[in-house]
Image (cartoon, rainbow, N blue to C red):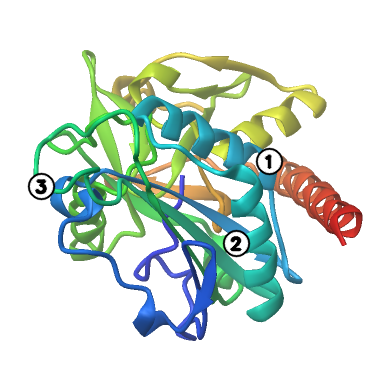
Amino acid sequence: MSDGAPGHGLSGDAPPDVVLFDGRLVPPEQARVSAFDRGLLYGESLFETLKVVAGAPCLWQPHLGRLMDACAELGLPLDVVALEEGVRRLLRARPVSLGALRIQVTGGERPGGGRGLTAPATGRRPRVIASVTAVPPQPLHVIDRGVDVVTAADLGRSLPWLKSGSYLASVAAKMRAENAGAFECLFVGGEPPGLLEGSFSNVLVWDGVRLASSPAHSRLVGVTERAVVQVARTMGMLTEERPLTLDELWAGGMRVVLLTGSLLGVCPCAAVDGRRMASAEAIVDGLRHGLHGHEAASRAAWERGGERGS
């Protein structure tokens, strides 16, 4: 999970000079939505953030698939062909060697006008907006030493299985992390209390035998997380879904806590709530190497698709 927002050490300062807005490339100041857009009124919006390397997006197909599924759940019609064609034009107009591509779909205005929590099933015209921003490489301290994280039991996203633009819980969690001098804040829920996900990341725990993730129904399953789990299996690691209880972390022994995200990649946690976690450099390096391979293959597939469409 990753939102590409400033504040977690990965975003660059270079503003995009062109935005894809409903199929048109326009300057950012022209990419404006109505005061009655349902994304603004009710938070009815969805988004995806993709890493861009050498002008090509990483893991395009699984990100697109997740966006399509979410749009279908909310009844938002999405023209996938037009979206991909528009993103290709955007990336040609806004070339970056390393960047973040953010695609957002909002509910648009209610067909027929007016307000109301629900909208007619027919006649809907969602807004589709995409932008690309240059980002710097990960800081060396993230790569080499890992990061400190804190937990929060009183925060959580509504409809967590959707990558919704209603991101207030994540904003509050990230602020809490920064106020504590930490890199990330992890949501905690369930009984016994367990790790769910971070404000912009997913969480994996290696106990020396299995690489575990929390149950999918309780959180947003990350595209990068899925790729990392696939890599782990090719490395011969056992994987499973189960509650990641805090009691387990505090019990001691070998507990390697990893964060994953589109822009973050694979990042070890040095400490959780001030308690030191174990390290496993060989495992982290192997997962990173495999993820880079997945990303490279997906970029090659994107470029082949562009050749067919030219």
Labels 3 and 1 touching (C-beta < 8 A): no
Q: Tell me the SS state at disc 2.
A: helix
User: At 49% across and 60% down in the image, what residue appears?
Assistant: 102
Residue 206: horizontal and vertical position, in percent?
56, 28
Residue 203: horizontal and vertical position, in percent?
46, 36
Check disc 1 and report the residue beneath it: 61
Indicate left or right for 116 with 48 as reference: left
Residue toward you, 227 or 308:
308
Check disc 3 and report the residue beneath it: 114
Label 1 amino acid?
A: Gln
159 lies above or below 173? above
Residue 96 shows in this picture: no
| Of the image marks 3 and 1, the number of the one nearer the N terminus | 1
Residue 150 shows in this picture: yes
User: At 20% across and 44% down in the image, what residue appears?
Assistant: 112
Q: Nearer the viewer, mark 2 or mark 3?
A: 3
| Of the image marks 2 and 1, the number of the one nearer the N terminus | 1
Residue toward you, 62 or 111:
111
Indicate left or right for 21 with 87 as reference: left
Tell me how far mark 2 sits from mark 3, CA to CA: 50 Å
Residue 143 shows which numbered tag? Answer: 2
User: At 79% across and 53% down in the image, what residue appears?
Assistant: 302
Q: Nearer the viewer, mark 2 or mark 1?
A: 1
Residue 246: horizontal and vertical position, in percent?
30, 26
Residue toward you, 161 or 206:
161
Q: For the C terminus, which image quadrant?
A: bottom right
